[in-house]
Amino acid sequence: MVERVITLKTSSDYLSPTEAALINRVAENFSSLLYIRRGRRWVSARSITGLLSMELADGETVSVISSGSDEVRALNSLAEFLKQNL
């Protein structure tokens, strides 16, 4: 399992349904499990509903966690996407 702390960059004040779907699309490219954690709450990056329920805000610090055979590639990909592309 690998983990990286990042600052979330969204196009508006909070994560939108479209942005959650884009995160899901990135996560589904890997066999590893990908999670986003804020405090004690973890959600799968493959769960659009879970991501939206976290009410993630622009500029918020979250952890990206990956576990599996391609965990490093998956973590790097999702972390960079969250920092730059939303």
Image: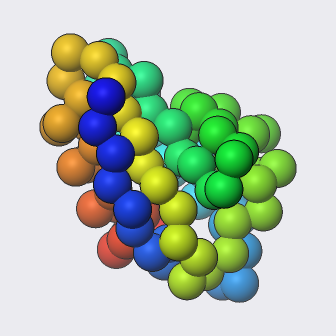
Quick check: 73 left or right of 59?
A: left
Q: Position of residue 75 (x, y in %)?
A: 28, 43
| Residue at horizontal 33 percent and vertical 54 percent from the top | 4
- Displayed quadrant of residue 44: top right
In the displayed image of the protein, which residue is found farthest to the right? 53
Position of residue 68 relative to residue 57, above or below, is above
| Residue at horizontal 45 percent and vertical 75 percent from the top | 7
Q: Position of residue 5 (x, y in %)?
A: 39, 62
Q: Position of residue 77 (x, y in %)?
A: 25, 48
Position of residue 41 relative to residue 11, above or below, is above
**Color style of the picture:** rainbow
In the displayed image of the protein, which residue is found farthest to the front? 40
Q: Nearer the viewer, residue 35 or 51?
A: 35
**Is any atom of residue 68 visible in this view?**
yes
| Residue at horizontal 22 percent and vertical 49 percent from the top | 76
- Displayed quadrant of residue 17: bottom right
Position of residue 14 relative to residue 81, above or below, is below
- Displayed quadrant of residue 34: top left
Q: Position of residue 11 (x, y in %)?
A: 57, 80
Q: Nearer the viewer, residue 9 or 22?
A: 9
